[in-house]
Amino acid sequence: MILTDYHVQHVLRAYSQQLSVKSRISKEKTVKNANQKDEVTLSMESKKMLIIDKIANEMVTQLASGSPRNFTAQTILKRLSQEYGQPLDVSSGDGQGMTFKVLSENNDRVKQYLPPNENSLLEKKLYEMAKVFINEQLI
């Protein structure tokens, strides 16, 4: 079989065209992949829950810090006291979370400091009550 210059040139031209098309397609794919960004969308309910969590966390921190208590903080602490069955007060512990105290009936003096296991349970309950109360206020 005899190959002429024309056949060789034709094969080389077709081969170079295929290479240029393939390289152009691969560049387009990398550009498309580079432009894709990870995007997270939150539902309205998720956003609401995040806001409630932030507010509740801030409210519990405010209660423990001993700063002046607003109506909301007093209401949450009052609900916790009603559920516990005795008047309670809360303060920040010695780097170990919150310290709950049982107050006398007229709320003027500390009757008893609660043990650490009850403190942790009441702290969780206080946080949950704060979330419920804030959710009620947002509706």
Image (cartoon, rainbow, N blue to C red):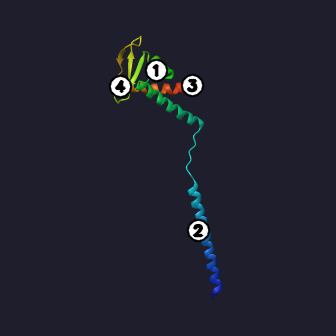
Q: Helix or strand or loop: what does disc 4 sit on?
A: helix
- Tell me which numbered mark, 2 or 1, is placed earlier along the sequence: 2
Q: Helix or strand or loop: what does disc 1 sit on?
A: helix
Q: Nearer the viewer, mark 2 or mark 1?
A: 1
Q: Helix or strand or loop: what does disc 3 sit on?
A: helix
Type of amino acid at the residue the image marks with label 3:
Gln
Q: Are marks 2 and 3 in contact (CB under 8 Å)?
A: no
**Quadrant assignment for the N terminus:** bottom right
CA distance for labels 2 and 4: 68 Å
User: Left or right: where does residue 107 sit relative to residue 130?
Assistant: left
- Tell me which numbered mark, 2 or 3, is placed earlier along the sequence: 2
- Give the labeled residue for mark 3: 137
- Give the labeled residue for mark 2: 23
CA distance for labels 2 and 3: 60 Å
Question: Measuring 39% from the left and 17% from the top, which residue is drawn there?
Answer: 102
Question: Measuring 45% from the left and 25% from the top, which residue is drawn there?
Answer: 126
Mark 2 is surrounded, within 10 Å at the Cα level, by few (under 14), some (14 to 19) or many (20 or more) other residues, namely few
- Give the labeled residue for mark 1: 77
- Give the labeled residue for mark 4: 116
Mark 4 is surrounded, within 10 Å at the Cα level, by few (under 14), some (14 to 19) or many (20 or more) other residues, namely some
Q: Which residue is more in the foreground, 51 or 131?
A: 51
CA distance for labels 3 and 1: 16 Å
Mark 1 is surrounded, within 10 Å at the Cα level, by few (under 14), some (14 to 19) or many (20 or more) other residues, namely many
Q: Are marks 3 and 4 in contact (CB under 8 Å)?
A: no
